[in-house]
Amino acid sequence: MAKETGHGEEAVLVGTAGDGREETAGAALEELKELAVSAGARVAAVLLRRSQRPDPAFFLGPGKIEELRQLVWEHQADLVIFDDELTPVQAGNLEELLATKIVDRTGLILDIFAQRAQTREAKLQVEKAQLEYLFPRLSGKGKALSRLGGGIGTRGPGETKLETDRRKLRQRMAIVNSRLKKVRAQRHLQRIPREKKAWPLLALVGYTSAGKSTLFRALTGTEVEVSERLFSTLDPALRRVVLPNRQEVFLVDTVGFIRKLPHQLVEAFRATLEEASHADLLLHVVNLAAPHVDEE
C-alpha cells in the first residue's frame, strides 16, 4: 500500500475486523490511520486480524505474527501500532520478538494528548492518565521502555521522557493527584460567579474533529484553534453568547470523543468533562459527511 502522510516514525498498523463486516473494519482502520498520523507517524503498511480470542502471550496467532514480522522487515518499521489494548506481557513479548517498538491504542491516544496539551491543567490531566497507564506495565516492560529512544509512546506532556523508575513514578503520581485536586477546587470556585448569573450553560459535544470548535468560533467570534487534527481541543473554552431572543447564555467547547476512549483519560479529564455534566443543554455536533455518521 502507499505510505500515508506523516513526518516521523515508520509504522505498521494492526487492526481488528470487529464484527466481521468489511465496512466496519474499514472505518476502524481509517480512524487508526488518523490517530497514527496525528501522533506523527508515517503509515507504511496495515495488517488486519479477525475478531477472535487474543493469544495470551503474543495477542496474535503464529501465522499473523509471521506476516507482521515480514511487514516490519520489508518496511524497516520503527514501531507497530495495535488498535487494541495489549497486556504488558503481550507488548513485551512482541517487542522482543520483532525487535521494534510496540504501541497499543491506549498508548497512542495518550501520546497524542501529551502532544496537544498546552495549559497547566491539560498537562496535569494527561500526565495523570499516562502514569496510571504506565505503572502496571513497568513490571512487564520496564526494561524495554528504558531502552527505547524518543518518539511515540515514550513522551509525556511537553516532550518530556516518561519516567520508568517505579519508586519515582509513584512519587510523581502523588504530586500530580495533589495538584489536580487544587485544579478541580479552582474550577468549582470559577463556576460560582457564573451560577449566580443564572444564565443557561450550553455545551458542544461530539466526536473529535466533528466541527465543534468551528461552530464555537462562528457563534462567539472567538479565535479558538480549528483543525482537522484529532483532539485539537483539550481545554474547555467558555464564552458568553447573546441569542436572537436576547437571552444570554454561556457556551462551552469540550474535548471530543472517539471509539474506545481510554478509561484513564475519562477519569483524568474529569475536571474538564464536568463542564458538560453541569450544562443545561448538550448540543451534539455531528459531521453529516462522515462515512459512518450513525456511529458518531
Image (cartoon, grey):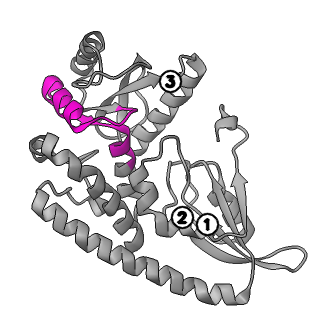
- Residue 215 vertical placement versus 46 (above, below): below
Image location of residue 120, percent across then percent down: 37, 73
Q: Residue at x 48, y 70 (%)?
A: 271
Most extreme residue toward the right is 245
Image location of residue 175, percent across then percent down: 24, 73
Q: Is residue 257 left or right of residue 155?
A: right
Q: Which residue is mark 3?
A: 18
- Residue 80 vertical placement versus 126 (above, below): above
Q: Amino acid at mark 1?
A: Ser
Q: What label does residue 74 carry, if any? A: none
- Indicate whether residue 27 is drawn in magenta: no
Image location of residue 97, percent across then percent down: 15, 23
Image location of residue 196, percent across then percent down: 68, 90
Magenta-colored span: 82-109
Q: Amino acid at mark 3?
A: Gly
Q: Earlier in the sequence, mark 3 or mark 2?
A: 3
Figure quadrant of residue 38: top left
Q: Is residue 170 left or right of residue 213?
A: left
Q: Which secondary structure lies at badge 2? A: helix
Q: Residue at x 18, y 63 (%)?
A: 170
Q: What label does residue 277 carry, if any? A: 1
- Indicate whether residue 84 is drawn in magenta: yes
Q: Between residue 60 and residue 42, name the one nearer to us.
A: 60
Q: Residue at x 33, y 33 (%)?
A: 81
